[in-house]
Image (spheres, coloured by chain):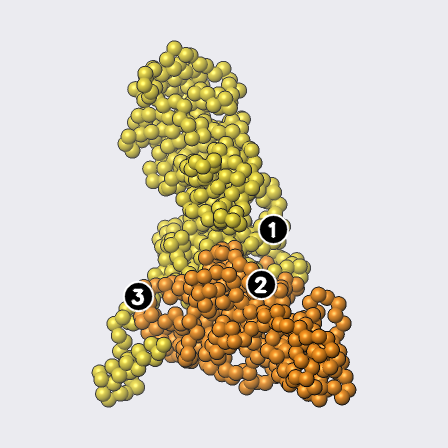
Amino acid sequence: MRRGKLLTLSLSLAMLMSSPTLRGAEPLTLSSTIEKAEQRRVEAIARATKSAVSVFVPGGGGGGSGVLISPDGYALTNFHVTSPAGSAMRCGLSDGNIYDAVIVGIDPVGDLAMIRLLGLDGKPRSDFPYAELGNSLTAEAGDWCMVIGNPFLLATNLQPTVTWGILSGVRRYQYPSGTLLEYGDCLQTDASVNPGNSGGPIYDADGKLLGIVGRCSFEKRGRVNVGVGYAISINQAVNFLGYLHSGRIVDHATLGATVATDQDDGSVRVTNILESSDAYRRGLRYASEVLSVDGRIVQSANDLQKVLATIPAGWRVKMSYREDGKTVDTLVRLRSVHLQDELLEKMSGALPPPPPIEKEKEKEKEDDSDDEEDSDEVEPDAAADDKIPPAVRKQLIERKGYANYFFNQKQQTRFIDSLRSQFPGQADQSNPAWEIEGNTVEAKPRPVKIRVGPDAIAMMVGETPMTAEDRGELYDAISQRSIGGIVSALEGWRRMLADGPKKFGESFYLGTMPLGGQRPLRDCMVGIDGEIEVRFLSHPDTGVVEVVEAFADRDEDPAELWILRDEVSSDQPPQMLDLRYGTDSVLKIKIDSWKKVEAK
Amino acid sequence: MVHEQPRSQCIPSQCVPRHSTPSRSLRLTTFLLFVFLANTASAQTSAHDWARTAQSKVVKVYGAGGMKGLEAYQSGFLVSPEGHIATAWSYVLDVEPIVLLDDGRRFEAEIIHFEPSLEIAVLKIDASALPYFELPKIREVQWGDPVLAISNLFNIATGDEAASIMQGRVASIASLDARSGTLKTPYRGEVLVLDLVANNPGAAGGAVVSADGKLAGMLGKELRDSATGVWLNYALPADVFRKTIGDIIAGRATSSAAAKEPQLPRDRSHNLQTLGLVLVPDVLETTPAFVDRVVTGSPAEEQNLRPDDLILLVSGQRTENQRLLKKRLRSIDRRDDVTVTIQRDNDILTVVLKP
């Protein structure tokens, strides 16, 4: 193996030939392959550096790194970087400016946080440089990569530090440190990652974003790089983007079942399952063999844990399993790992608020694990600084269960505006009833008439009339998996249109999730009307509502109203309504007319 | 999570901006990297193919340890298609270890033999048609050459995950005894000094691979210079252990057969008394053969054996505990010499005890 030297030698020869009078001032001539490769790297670094953010906690309370992911200033960082700052932080970009930023949403389990940078004038700005997203699932061990950020908070001139290396491992599972933070499906790199790199980007060799750096293996050699840094995969971050935009404190998903890898045949089998779980309702049983979840093949218990770690609570994903010799492809709804209060409690225990000097010291004593998040440096003179800039204050609403309720409101407004702009919404504040007529789609079609309105809720399928006198009957229709569940969903839709989220009941924007296990991720708005929880899933590009789900009991299948349109013209009635429970369609109606009439 | 205050921390308003321009040497490094890149990998954005082939030959070794500060794991690599594995000789091998292959298969391994002066051991698992490293006749790398280090450092590779890959260069090739006494290792020969932080907990026994995928060396145990406090990143060059491993695989050196050797009658064989050795009390099933006392005027005293010497080998055979040592002595005729290899602090010494 003399390649390196041989080439150097041949290059020297080439230089000798091209410039016989070797002078020191002569520029070095490179072979075109090398020049191209080097040029490519120079460009990738130049591109990537622009979107890297140096995060500083106001009042000298520490800091870390981050990365811009959209032109309107949304950036990702670590939860453990924003945590000492609370709601407001200062962010430096390589353009030499320092911008105010506000917290948007946090994922304490996945150690992610979304912040929003504001323009220098304190107003939202729409032309920030931002990172192009890569695909961490296709990244492989050995791929060249770079980490850009603010190690040791060195970026005092706001020029971030670039370190270069390879991916040492991909799809790694790293056990939780403490009780909360879990790096479930992460990347491992030998590019230098040091305290202060936390929350910053790791890019591939072309400058595409592969993940968010956040953790290192430290041991007896002190808190400096020992060749092992970890990053949350960008694909996991992408799954959580919608949830983070909701301004909520978000949680991760659980299947409601445990699995183990069979030592004999290597299969992944269910060792325990909750009967209240959706997976159980979809037929998963003790000793069933899990084949894939969310399109990812599962070949070990470790694999399943990794896939689930990348999914937010409440998602419904594709799942394949083998039970009794038969392969079943189905959809499962994933519950949250924690109860809401449990998460808040753990979160407050995980990271102390500033000024944390004394507490920090205690923590250091008790924690001698070799995996640690690498940032949160705290200055001795750090003092709690409640002076939140007015520009940030304008984008901040504190509320329990939320990192920043302002952004949830923003999404709610976007949702209701979009809902009202599409059929059967209306611009005015009138409150009409709906009269829908059509025929069932079956061998012998039966006529269907539905009326939902503030005055009456009724439906007639063939010769069978049904009415709902009160909310209790709408609840029962769902609970009994009756075809009457269609009016429960329609009534939820009608009421949301008429009353809007503020008057509907407790309403909030949940985030984005697959529809029927399929991407693109749909926006999900939740409205709780007494005992019935209604969810609206709408297309991210058009805003058109595709499914309305009405839940009676959390542990039962909701009534799913699929609104099928042949074309995207959202100002026309849909062609078809399809009512489903679980994965079964129970009533399909071809719509002939959909009138808005005065309520009696 | 530990929070702490690094010396260099500051916020923008308090600091004089620093400017950095890439130094000339840095540019040169970059340049060299691409020389190497352009030549080794057709896909320039990845060293994956290069790494993957080598990675498939690296194994995870689990054994004794797990107590505070002692990891119960290390690394190793296959050196024959029939399941011979080269690894570092360490306390992890105090029990018969478990080996996890790159393909996820798990095996109980047998310790075939070890060479104390090189701190290497060879394990064997019952398998065949495995990917393995050929042991090179010549030194595969020189200083300045790019290498990959593949190991299960920090036991990061959970379950069936593949070993970790790191990249860097051979910074120099130097002799460890140049700073005799400051590095706690019996090995005195040349090592590949690496410019990457390769020698972490669990990395010992990992493979160092040259740019054309050949075995360049084996990562050594963690070593810290006691004078400077500096951690050394190094590997044993493959040509140094080639013969030893070759001998072990060929069966020319083996210790596993020790127990099967014919035993002589007690009055005709050697024992501790004939050599003048008193060992520490044998309280465990696997009490190591530490010398407690040496009898005056005995063969042991003649050869200057001392208290605290650890007897590793008798006539080249492994004696990992007192029971095996006694058994081993039973197979040697009282009239014959006994060759004993001992560890005394960081030295490995071989002495011949004459009756």
Q: Nearer the viewer, residue A598 or B264?
A: B264
- Which quadrant: the C terminus of chain A? top left
The amino acid beneath tag 1 is Thr
> Which residue is under mark 1?
A179
Q: State the SS at label 3.
A: loop
Q: Quadrant of the N terminus of chain A?
A: bottom left
Q: Is the Cβ of the residue at disc 2 closer than 8 Å to that at disc 1?
A: no
Same chain shared by disc 3 and disc 2: yes
| Chain letter tied to orange | B
Residue at position x 32%, y 16% from top? A444
Q: Quadrant of residue B349?
A: bottom right
Residue A493 versus residue B18 in the image, above or below: above
Residue nearest the viewer, comparing A27 with A420? A27
Give, as a three-letter code, the residue at label 2.
Pro
Q: Label 1's element?
A: loop
Position in image of residue A416 (x %, y %): 41, 33
The spot of residue A313 in percent (x, y) is 50, 41
Q: Which residue bears the numbered disc 2?
A: B97
Do the residues under discs 1 and 3 have CB atoms within 8 angstroms?
no
